[in-house]
Image (cartoon, helix red, strand yellow):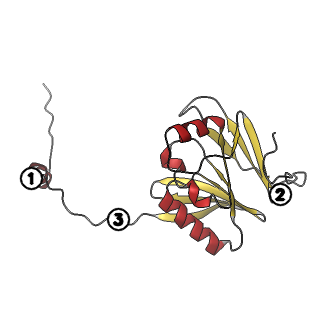
């Protein structure tokens, strides 16, 4: 016969029995921007990460995470890259813990997502900007001589998760006339 020993803090038991939770000051949220390579950067908000790419014509950002994180990111981008607005926000999939806060960039950015995202965002009233540019299988976005390749690989984590690739710029790449949306 095996014995299982469970150790429980008497403080936790006392708090649970009294219905009172121990008072704790909220911890500050860790937010930082780290350069990955070239003009591609990682944005961290607590345990969530996202990426963005800086071009001469604007910034391409992905998953804003939430409204507070998006506001912080917008302010940081304005400090670090003055006069370069966010021109595109890409949603990796429709889950609120990734896409909330898209409205923070809506005044200057085109919101891009898989076509199934739009249905879920509207139907479930997600707290974010509704995509204005959608695709079904693949889409290449070009801005300022750089590109982002978006691919839908089929149902997995959701019915709209996409893969994003930031290839190195090549001399043969041309800016799309409308600023976005040349199919591969």
Q: Give the percent coordinates (x, y) of residue 184.
A: 81, 39
Left or right position of 30 against 172? left
**Residue at horizontal 12 percent and vertical 54 percent from the top:** 15
Residue that label 2 marks: 145
Q: Give the percent coordinates (x, y) of residue 16.
A: 13, 49
**Residue at horizontal 77 percent and vertical 44 percent from the top:** 140
Q: Circle 2 — which element?
A: loop
Q: Residue furthest top?
A: 1
**Above or below, comparing residue 3 to residue 11 in the picture:** above
Q: Give the percent coordinates (x, y) of residue 137.
A: 72, 33
Q: CA distance from mark 1 to mark 2?
A: 62 Å
**Residue at horizontal 57 percent and vertical 56 percent from the top:** 103
Give the number of the disc on residue 58: none
Left or right position of 68 against 174? left
183 or 6, nearer to the observer: 183
Give the number of the disc on residue 18: 1
**Above or below, comparing residue 179 to residue 1 in the picture:** below
**Residue at horizontal 51 percent and vertical 51 percent from the top:** 100
Q: Is residue 38 visible?
A: no
């Amino acid at each position: 016969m095996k014995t299982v020993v469970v150790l429980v803090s008497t403080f936790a038991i006392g708090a649970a029995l009294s219905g009172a939770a121990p008072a704790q000051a909220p911890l500050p949220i860790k937010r930082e921007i780290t350069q990955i390579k070239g003009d591609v950067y990682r944005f961290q908000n607590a345990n969530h990460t996202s990426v963005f790419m800086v071009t001469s014509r604007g910034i391409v950002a992905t998953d804003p995470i939430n409204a507070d994180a998006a506001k912080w990111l917008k302010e940081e981008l304005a400090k670090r890259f003055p006069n370069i607005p966010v021109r595109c926000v890409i949603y990796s999939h429709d889950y609120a813990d990734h896409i909330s806060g898209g409205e923070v960039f809506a005044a200057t950015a085109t919101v891009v997502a898989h076509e199934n995202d739009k249905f879920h965002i509207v139907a479930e009233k997600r707290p974010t900007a509704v995509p204005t540019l959608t695709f079904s299988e693949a889409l290449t976005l070009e801005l300022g001589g750089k590109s982002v390749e978006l691919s839908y690989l089929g149902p997995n984590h959701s019915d709209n998760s996409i893969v994003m690739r930031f290839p190195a710029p090549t001399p043969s790449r041309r800016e799309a006339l409308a600023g976005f949306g040349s199919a591969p």
